[in-house]
Each structure stands twice: as C-alpha cells, then as structure tokens.
Amino acid sequence: MIRVMIADDHQLFAEGLSQALNSLPDARVVGVVSSGPALREALTGQPAEVAIVDIEMPDGDGIESIAKIGTSCRAIVVSMHASDDQRERARRAGAKGFFSKAVPLSTLAAAVRAVADGQDLMGLTDEERDELLEKFFEAELDPGAAALTPREREILQHLAAGISATDELAERLFISQKTVKNHLASIFQKLAVSDRTQAAIEAIRLGIARPN
Amino acid sequence: MIRVMIADDHQLFAEGLSQALNSLPDARVVGVVSSGPALREALTGQPAEVAIVDIEMPDGDGIESIAKIGTSCRAIVVSMHASDDQRERARRAGAKGFFSKAVPLSTLAAAVRAVADGQDLMGLTDEERDELLEKFFEAELDPGAAALTPREREILQHLAAGISATDELAERLFISQKTVKNHLASIFQKLAVSDRTQAAIEAIRLGIARPN
DNA sequence: TGACAATTGGGTCGACGGACCCATGAGGAA
DNA sequence: TTCCTCATGGGTCCGTCGACCCAATTGTCA
C-alpha cells in the first residue's frame, strides 16, 4: 500500500484527487494539506511514501517545501499551467515527477507507483517517461486477488453489483448453480473470506468491482 | 439521484471531481468532457440535471456553451482564479452558481443539490449563498435509507466492515443472535434488498458505511 | 394517558449457502 | 505426451439464513 500526501490550496482539486487515489487498490491518501509549510508539518506526524504537490500555492509555494522534506518522502509536482521554467525549478528542488493537471488520472496513478518504486521521472524525455510508466499502469494486487481467474473476477463483479443469489448468478453467467458455487468456493479461499458478503466487500476494496 | 456532467480540460481535476461526486449517495456523474462544444454534444445524448463547467477552457471557453445548453441542464461554473469579471460573465450566460476551485467539496456538493432543486445562487451575496447552502449540506437519502434507525445503521456499518456472520455481529453488539436477525430483517425491508450481501453493498453505495 | 417507534428477545420452518468429496473436457506449458 | 490450470458439472451434508408468527420493555410525542 502506497501512502500518499496531497498538498494543494485548491480544496476541490485536492479532495477530488484524494477520492480518486483512494479508489485505487494499492494507494491510500493519508493527508490533505493546503500549503507548503503544512505539508512539512504533516509529514512529521504521518509518514508517506509519495507527496503530490501543487507548484502554485500561496503562503510559500510548493517548490521550497519539497527541498525540505528530505528523502523519506518523494515528491511529484503537479501544475495548472505547466511550463519549462516550473519543471526546471521542480527538478532542482528534488522532485521525482512533474505533471500538468491536464494529464489523465491513470498517468498520475502510474507515476505514483513508479516514484514509490524508486524511479526518477525528471531526467527523462516525455517519450522515455511514458514508456517507463507503462509498466506501472496496473495496480499490484494482493497476492490472493492476483490469483483470481477471469471467470472468478466476473462473478465478483456481478456479486458487487448486487447479484448475490446463486440462481441469479447462474442465470446471468449461463452456467449451472453448481458451477457458481464452485467458483465462489475458490474465490473465498483466494481472498481469505468466508462468505459472499465479505467477498463482495473485498472485491470493492481491491478495485476488482465497483459498487455501482 | 442528480445526474451531473463535468466539463473541464484538466483531466486530473475532472476525474477526481467525478470520483468525489460519485461517492455522494445522491449524485451520479454521467459524463466527463474537456471542452465547451463537447459539453453541448454530450448533453444531447445524455440528459443531466446539473453541469459543472470550468470557465477556463481552450477551444471556446465554458461561458459560451452555457448560454447554448438551454434550460434542460443548469450550469455551475468553477474557476481556478475566480474574479468578479468572470462571475459577471457567468451570470450573464445563465449560470446558476459560481465557485472557486478553492472551495471544499462539501460546498460544491451542496451547490449541486441546491441548483438541482431549482435554486439560483448567482444573485446572492456570499453570506446569503452560504446560508442557503446550509440546507443542502446533507444528502437526501433514499426513502428507505432515511428510515433506518441508529441501531440498524450500526449493524450495516459492521456488515460493510466484513462482520457478516450472525454470531460475530451479536458478539460485537452485545445482543442475542435473534435480535441481530430481527434488525437485519428490518434493514432488508427498508433497503429493498434480500440478503446481507446486497445490504452491505447498498450501505456502501449510500454512504452509510465505508468499505475500509 | 394513549399511541407509536425502537430495541430487545422468543419460536418454527423451509430454503439456501458453504464445505467436502468427486469427474470431464479444453487449452497452454514443459 | 504429460502435466497443470481453468471452467464446467455432479452429489451429499450440515449449518445458517431469511420469512413468518409473536411479546416485553423503554422512551417519545401528541
């Protein structure tokens, strides 16, 4: 699990990004602050592997604080109006990544994973960076979840969508009720749960299925 | 359920906001687009009660498109650098709300509910607006969910946390297994579900409980 | 006071869920 | 070819779950 701290004075952005990152199965936002100094303070009380920092903040902008948080937490800088000048300043401050807020969430998620893995995205061209990020687009699932077969995932998705009865599951999947029970038994073992309720919750938590 | 369309060229912001609004029990983001023209086009194929529009977009900014989407969908304008000039332009275009991206999510959520309810937030002072929004801070829950008793909510929270067996629930709540089953039966009826798996999913969807 | 909701608990009963055993055919890997 | 996984399915069995009936206590509100 990658612990992420967000520093951005635009609360709407910060809270939205927090929700989005929390929906990833392998990341958890442990703090949201709205200034550089607050970021440093928050990191003393709550360790995090990655900090996502807005470069444009009042009250001492993000860049200064990045240089001060040291090596315990790696920083990814995001900017509304990304410029070469900003990128250079972020690089000198020790940031490991630099992104415009116009990038898709999946790119930032991949960057978070890459940076948490120890990669430095700053010295790369855009092409090199995107190539490197490709390896990080998929979340590393729990050992149990990773072992799920496609059919088992499918059943979990139906389960998390509210199709909980054996006969209904069998109907939608065009298989016998017995096969549904066999798949479920296998799922229970792999996810280390004991019934469909817990399996559905785990599926949602792991990002295999969405509640809606 | 309030259907919301988001128009913002900053994908990171749009996707984050989408996630955040979807986590509300009474709103559903039905589309995310990145330009004014795309917003108009999306609304023809997918109706929505509220559109959240960034005023600063390339390719014809948000204001122009607001005037053209008509009365079927009410617009709330959000801006990175909110100015009086922008506010005035938004008002003239027919927007029902205007917010800086620095406001907390709860404020925007309240604004979405207020605007969906037919309120116009543009002609108000900040004080009048905040007073009006207070009435909309809490989501209007489904009729069934609203009728849940505190004890029933408590059971749902345990259920969504993975405590699914009757004996375990009874143990944690210090009541007999029979009482647990009675409460569950009542919950099933109120939420219109037929077993604990569906109840747990509904609880998560309605925001009564969190999966973690 | 009287009515109602919430919480607690009882009993019964049929149906369903989950644990255990098993087999077969398809497909990929060594 | 042999081995393994995946998906399919069978059967049995016990425990649990959910539906139905019910009652006592407490507290609130008209």
Image: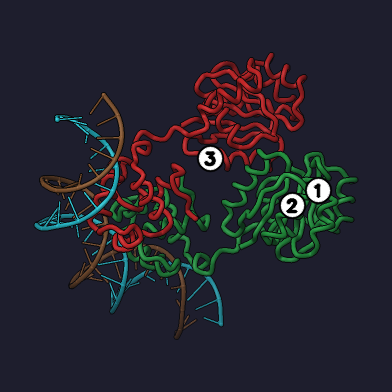
Chain colours: A green, B red, C cyan, D brown
**Which label is found at residue B22?**
3
Marks 2 and 1 share the same chain: yes
Find disc 2 in the rendering and name its residue: A39
Disc on the earlier residue, 2 or 1: 2
- Disc 2 vs disc 3: Cβ atoms closer than 8 Å? no
> As shown in the figure, which amino acid type bears the numbered disc 2?
Leu
Residue that appears at 34% across and 47% down:
B151
Label 2, label 1: how far apart the Cα atoms are:
9 Å
Amino acid bearing label 1: Gly
Residue B209 visible in this rendered orientation of the protein = yes
Disc 2 vs disc 1: Cβ atoms closer than 8 Å?
yes
Whether residue A179 is visible, yes or no, is no
Q: Chain of mark 3?
A: B
Nearest-to-viewer mark from 2 and 1: 2
Label 1 sits on residue = A62
Q: Chain of mark 1?
A: A
